[in-house]
Image (cartoon, grey):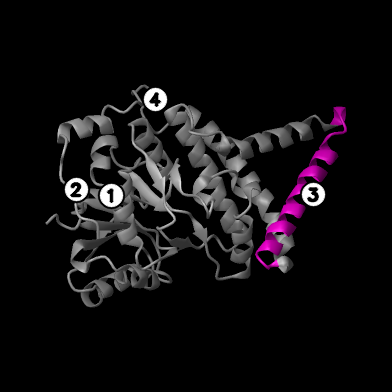
Amino acid sequence: MARVPFVTIAVPCFNEERHIEAFLDDVFAQDYPADSIEVLIGDGMSTDKTREILERIAKTRPPSGTQLRMLDNPKRLQAAAMNIMIAAAKGDIIVRLDVHARYAKDFVRQCVTVLQETGAQNVGGPARPAAETWFQKAVCAALLSKLAVGNSSYRNLDAEGWVETAFPGAFPREVFEVVGGFDPNAVTNEDAELNQRIHEAGGRVFLSQKIVVHYFPRDSYRGLMKQYFKYGKGRARTMLKHRGLPTIRPLLPFFLVVGGATLLVTSPWHPLLLPAIGLYGSAALLEGLRVAAKEKRLHLAPVVASIFPVLHMSHGVGFAAGLAHYFFKPDWDRHADDKPRRTFADLKQENGIGRPEPTTV
């Protein structure tokens, strides 16, 4: 009888004393065989009590057979943490988890099953937002709108099928043998950058409704602005590094910022600035009212409407900053061939045909 695939759960972590225990409750409650799971925490040298909590839990709480190990990540970047954990992993499958999320009890099992059923190189589920505060409730409502996320498949709660990227990501180990690890210098966008390399090497990413995870968005305007500024900057870096993006969607906030700035600078010579602001503001307000009413949170409509320009402006300005920074100071070898030296077709040939598959759990 074929064996059950051994799974490594890989978790980037930094200063998570408030959330790490609840997160590990979800991990330890998984219905996947406990003796076929190891949990690796790539800790960025936390300065709060996270490390103490992890050391205590490692000694007292993992289910029988489950290993919990903490690995140091001096660079503190999530991409660096993932590479450290991948190098130390024993698993046939690497499942990335984020601390600021909650996971269904069958999350790991469904990731393994969908990988086996589809033959994909990465699988995940729709990014389902969840809320604890009134501001997060407004963000959740905003993120259900195409005005906030465009046609992003993994943000579509009803989507399923082949996509650009999925959340949070589960990979057969050999994926990293083909495309390499996460980009060690990527501050953000490391998951989308990896998925871009997977596609370039002939791989595919599958989004499944069976894989259920809820994540918690930022709980303040300041936090949201900083997050989306970093997202925009990371997208610009990925575009310059790979000389393109899979879709123009990440460019739209940048075009909005450039267009707005152009109208502002040239406003002495035309009357278009105020009508443009009015049109954008009206669209944001109407969409805020629509999604707030749909979510039965009409009292939050003004906050929802105000979140749209925060997302657009922060991402767009961040993208512009990334273009300016990384065009002149790239942190990768600009002269290196960015095409994959190895493909998944090569891997299939090397492994031969008729290789037995692990059993479905």
Pick the front one: 242 or 91: 91
* Residue at screen point 72% across, 66% down: 298
Side of 352 relative to 175 (left or right):
left
Work out whether 284 lies above or below 48: above
Specify the label residue 180 is tagged with.
Answer: none
Report the span colored magenta. 268-297
Specify the label residue 282 is tagged with.
Answer: 3
Work out whether 58 lies above or below 274: below
Identify residue for label 1.
116
Crowding around mark 4 (Cα neighbors within 10 Å: few <14, some 14 to 19, many 20+) is few
- Camera-side mark, 4 or 3: 3
Lower sequence index among marks 2 and 3: 3
Pick out the residue farthest to the bottom.
60
Can you say which quadrant of the picture contains the C terminus?
bottom left
Identify residue for label 4.
334
Counting every numbered tag in the picture gives 4
The amino acid at mark 2 is Glu
* Residue at screen point 72% across, 57% down: 290
Identify residue for label 2.
357
Q: Secondary structure at mark 3?
A: helix
Q: Secondary structure at mark 4?
A: loop
